[in-house]
Amino acid sequence: MISSSIRNALRAPVAARAIVRPTLASRPMMMRFQRNYSSDHHEETFEEFTVRYEKEFENAYDLFEVQRILNNCFSYDLVPAPVVIEKALQACRRVNDYPTAVRTFEALKHKVENNTQYEAYLEELKDVRKELGIDLKEQLYADEA
Amino acid sequence: MFRQSVARLAIRQQSTVAKAAPRALSNSYVGSLETRWESLPKEDQTTLIEELKTRMEGPWQELTSAEKKAAYYISFGEWGPRRPLYQPGDKSKILWGTIGGLFAGFGLFALIRSFAAEGPTTMNREWQDASDEYLKSKNANPFTGHSQVQ
């Protein structure tokens, strides 16, 4: 009597385990599959993009690097935020390359959808342009066009 | 006194700050680079690039318009790998060249054909009519006709 109840008490947890996880117990060798779909990745938001490129431009140490980052920055299906452009211009100033600064605005003009947006960008970046003394290509070649 | 000034000169010579070109490069030196850049000797190009680089180390407001244009032209101007595939006027040249070539080809063909031998004697109307007469006399091919006229 006593021995049987002790036996029951000992067996109880084993039985409970068997009830709770029957599938794992019956198929112990089953492998877990993981598929690496491209959609599994986190999609970068515009804000994250902005922060990332601000940082990249801050860390750019030579002209090649600045131009490489500019190239990457303008390769997305978006127009970089004015803060990013400002960082880019400051990076151009740091590596002392005037033409790249002019080219940045040219790229911006190419990238925006219409002239109104370009004007808005110019308005937004007016101060930094004045501070660094950057002309637009239109201004540089105004007398020839 | 003298030694001091010599020392000061030496410091200035070796410092990287004092070397920045204080004077603007003259307009005739950097101006209208578009027309003569590629014919410039390699050493002159290098010196000009170096001088512009030193100028660009200073504030950009002090750059003259000619310097800015020259720097822009050297970096992103239409020369070397950036030269456009077609210069202005190239496209009409291609168009007229193609049309001219086409007509020249037709002309050459006509010229050669004019020296060609006569066609075969059976290819004229009289011969073929005579053939028809003959075939008719022989009751040739009553089902689909026997005409030899081409």
Image: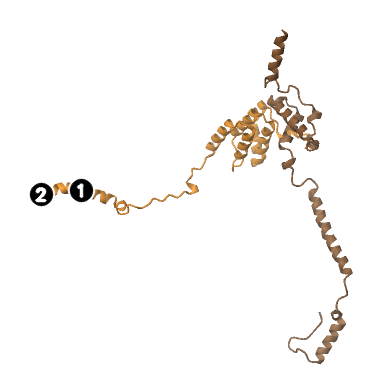
Chain colours: A orange, B brown
| Vertical comparison of B139 with B14: above or below | below
Q: Amino acid at mark 2?
A: Met
**Percent x, y for residue B51?**
73, 28
Q: Answer few, some or many: residues within 10 Å of disc 2's Cα (few below 14, many 20 plus, some between 14 and 19).
A: few
Residue lying at the far right in this picture: please name it: B115
Q: Which residue is mark 2?
A: A1
> Which one is nearer the viewer's eye here, A126 or A16?
A16
Query: Mark 1: which secondary structure?
Result: helix
Specify the farthest residue to the top.
B1
Q: Amino acid at mark 1?
A: Ala
The residue at which mark 1 appears reads as A12
Gap between marks 1 and 2 measured at Cα: 17 Å
| SS at badge 2 | loop
Of the residues under marks 1 and 2, which one precedes in the sequence? 2
Whether residue B144 is situated above or below residue B105 in the rendered picture = below
Q: Quadrant of the N terminus of chain B?
A: top right
The image quarter containing residue B70 is: top right
Q: Residue furthest bottom?
A: B138
Q: Quadrant of residue B30?
A: top right
**The residue marked by circle 2 belongs to what chain?**
A
Q: Is residue B6 above or below residue A2?
A: above
Q: Residue at x 87, y 71 (%)?
A: B116
Q: State which chain disc 1 sits on.
A: A
Quadrant containing the C terminus of chain B in the rendered view:
bottom right
Q: Residue at the spot x=68%, y=20% of the render?
A: B14
> Which corner quadrant of the image does residue B104 belong to?
bottom right
For label 1, the crowd category at 10 Å Cα-Cα, with few meaning under 14, some 14 to 19 and many 20 or more, is few
- In the rendered structure, the answer to whether residue A113 lies left or right of residue B92 reads left
Residue A73, percent from left and from top: 60, 38
Q: Position of residue B140 (x, y in %)?
A: 77, 90
